[in-house]
Image: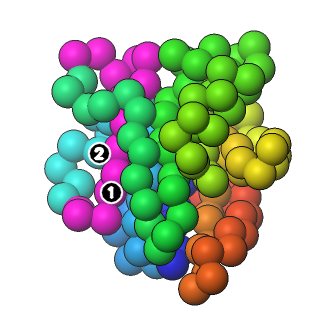
Amino acid sequence: MKICVVSDSHGRKKSLEELVGSNNFDYIFFLGDGLSDLRGIDSDKIKKVSGNCDFFSDEAETLVFDIKGVKIMMTHGHKFKVKINTSLLLKYAKERGAKLVCYGHTHKSNLEVVDGVMLLNPGAFRDYKYAVVDIDERGGIGVSFEDYHK
């Protein structure tokens, strides 16, 4: 299972369309701040949450779901004050049994495992940064950070 994790596109609509349209991924996780960049992109592969710059969005701010037996949480991160630290995010994720947490907001790539929970921030797609998550048949998780070549 290959998942593209993108956040904070802030107007990079054309590049986002190309990335989503590449069909290289089983899912696209969009972590907010640029939901309008997804307008016109019709794909059932996209899971999305709203960010602090997605004014008047009807999208949820946080989602928790399972893929291949791995409980995943997606959020933009602003409600969890991730620019200060990830302690609120981690607490919320642990309470819900999440193994992988994807968040944005800081515009900085980050990957850490704390108390068995993997916290992943792909960085800002505004800066052409994104991450790829591979989930194997045993629920193992691999992550790579990528640069989108314009």
Q: Is residue 25 above or below residue 82?
A: below
Q: Nearer the viewer, mark 1 or mark 2?
A: 1
Which of these two is toward me, 114 or 54? 114
* Residue 148 visible at all: yes
Residue 101 circle label:
none
> Residue at position x 80%, y 44% from top?
115
Q: Residue at x 74, y 23 (%)?
A: 87
Camera-nearest residue between 134 and 22: 134
Query: How far across and how far down the image is residue 33, in percent?
Result: 44, 28
Residue 50 percent across, percent down from the top left: 36, 29
In screen coordinates, is 64 left or right of 1? Answer: left
Q: Amino acid at mark 2?
A: Leu
Q: Position of residue 1 (x, y in %)?
A: 51, 78
Residue 126 image position (x, y, % from top left): 56, 37
Q: CA distance from mark 1 to mark 2?
A: 9 Å
Task: Give whichever of 148, 97 is nearer the camera.
Answer: 97
Say which element carries label 1: strand
Callout 1 amino acid: Ile
Residue that appears at 70% across and 17% down: 83
**Residue 19 seen by the camera:** no
Labels 1 and 2: the sequence-earlier one = 2
Q: Residues within 10 Å of mark 2 (few under 14, many from 20)?
A: many
Using the image, determine if residue 108 lies above or below residue 17: above
Q: Quadrant of residue 19 in the image?
A: bottom left
Say whether marks 1 and 2 touch (CB < 8 Å). Answer: yes
At 62% from the left edge and 52% from the top edge, which residue is drawn? 100
**Residue to which mark 1 is pinned:** 46
What span is in magenta? 43-56
Residue that mark 2 sits on: 38
Examine the rendered structure and indicate whether residue 150 appears above or below residue 92: below
Mark 2: secondary structure: helix
